[in-house]
Image (cartoon, rainbow, N blue to C red):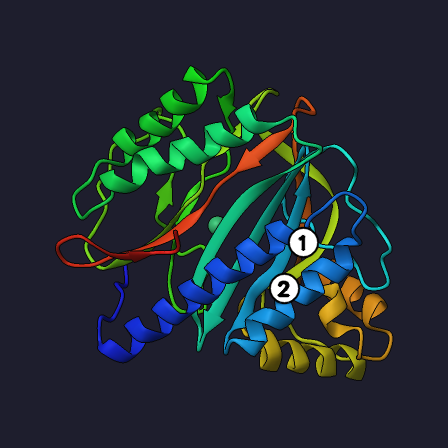
């Protein structure tokens, strides 16, 4: 496992990404109101990220109710926030490839505080446990117990994850249950911890296209359109996920993205839906673990 290079410059970039991500998350939750147009909200937040000196590390994800993750509105969408329900707002910011990933859940209509509070409390309970050598099983079981004690289930097949430069899911997982191999947190690692809670079955299944893609496999391509789209993708997003709407300035972008996805050159993310249709809440912070303890988090 490659560790965080703790030279000052890298750490400064990470800390800046974290503080922009925190502001973007708060602004996003504030703007996510019944009747507001989702596309306007994600664009406003992504512009805020850029104004502050960062870039989106992935498209702002909006998850209403049983949509747990991997949805962003497509270009031209007039979809609005519903009058009731929960909205998860998951935002990633990078500065020169150094990524902070953070999420919160807003209450549309004001009836969902217990569900929302259970994921938030789970995260608050485990943050003090995080340090080099900490048990992943203890962290997972603490998340699970906190959520079940409030009457919900953790979503067991969504996990926290380590983050490396330009790599959002770098291989070290932080499960949301205690049923897991007991590994320990290494030194000098960046991890995002993200409890999800639900009144449904407690796991997610794949849904429809969520308008999010990322580079996948290298392949020989023969047509000009595909090659030129691919070089735009590499140039703008490197290996990080991107939105269909971020390429709407490119000629015939939808067709070409679909073609690249069919060939396996890019990966098309599907929305992740709670298996029983239950509402899902989520809370997430990115935590920089140093040699001896936590250096900072996106709280
Ligand atoms: Co994450």
Dot 1: element: helix
Rendered residue at 35%/52% (across/down): 191
Which residue is disc 2 drawn over?
45
Secondary structure category for the residue under label 2: helix
Residue 28 placement (x, y as % from top left): 61, 55
Task: In the rendered view, tell whether residue 178 sits above or below residue 133.
Answer: above
In the figure, residue 47 lies in which quadrant? Answer: bottom right
**How many tags in the picture?**
2
Residue plotted at (65% across, 76% down):
233
For marks 1 and 2 on the same chain, the one whose residue lies earlier in the sequence: 1
In the image: residue 286, left or right of residue 234: left
Q: Residue at x 37, y 63 (%)?
A: 164
50 and 261: which one is in front? 50
Q: Position of residue 190 (x, y in %)?
A: 32, 57
Residue 99 position, x and y percent, is 43, 65
Q: Which of 1 and 202 lies nearest the eye of the viewer?
A: 202
Left or right of 236 in this view: 118: left
Q: Is residue 161 left or right of residue 60?
A: left
101 vs 124, nearest the viewer: 124
Whether disc 2's CB lies below 8 Å from ligand 1 is answered no
Q: Is residue 265 visible?
A: no
The relative height of residue 224 versus residue 237 in the rendered view (above or below) is below
Q: Are marks 1 and 2 in contact (CB under 8 Å)?
A: yes
Q: Quadrant of the N terminus?
A: bottom left
Image quarter of residue 83:
top right
* Label 1 sits on residue: 31
Q: Is residue 128 above or below residue 177?
A: below
Instruction: Judge the density around disc 2: few (<14), some (14-19), many (≥20) Cα neighbours within 10 Å.
Output: many
């Amino acid at each position: 496992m490659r560790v965080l290079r703790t030279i000052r410059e890298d750490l400064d970039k990470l800390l800046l990404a974290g503080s922009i991500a925190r502001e973007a998350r708060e602004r996003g939750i504030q703007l996510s109101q019944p009747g507001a147009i989702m596309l306007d909200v994600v664009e406003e937040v992504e512009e805020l990220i850029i104004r502050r000196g960062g870039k989106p590390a992935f498209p702002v994800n909006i998850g209403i109710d049983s949509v747990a993750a991997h949805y962003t509105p497509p270009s031209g969408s007039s979809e609005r926030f519903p009058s009731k329900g929960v909205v998860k707002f998951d935002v990633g910011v990078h500065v020169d490839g150094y990524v902070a990933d953070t999420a919160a859940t807003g209450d549309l209509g004001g009836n969902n505080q217990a569900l929302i509070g259970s994921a938030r409390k789970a995260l608050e309970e485990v943050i003090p446990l995080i340090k080099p050598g900490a048990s992943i099983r203890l962290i997972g079981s603490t998340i699970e117990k906190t959520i079940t004690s409030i009457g919900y289930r953790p979503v067991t097949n969504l996990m926290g994850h380590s983050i490396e430069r330009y790599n959002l899911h770098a291989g070290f997982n932080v499960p949301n249950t205690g049923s897991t191999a007991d590994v320990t947190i290494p030194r000098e690692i960046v991890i995002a911890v993200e409890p999800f809670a639900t009144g449904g079955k407690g796991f997610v299944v794949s849904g429809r296209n969520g308008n999010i893609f990322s580079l996948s496999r290298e392949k020989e391509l023969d047509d000009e359109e595909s090659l030129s789209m691919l070089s735009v993708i590499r140039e703008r997003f490197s290996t990080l996920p991107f939105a269909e709407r971020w390429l709407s300035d490119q000629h015939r972008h939808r067709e070409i993205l679909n073609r690249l996805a069919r060939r396996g050159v890019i990966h098309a993310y599907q929305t992740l839906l709670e298996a029983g249709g239950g509402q899902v809440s989520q809370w997430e912070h990115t935590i920089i673990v140093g040699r001896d303890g936590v250096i900072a988090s996106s709280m």
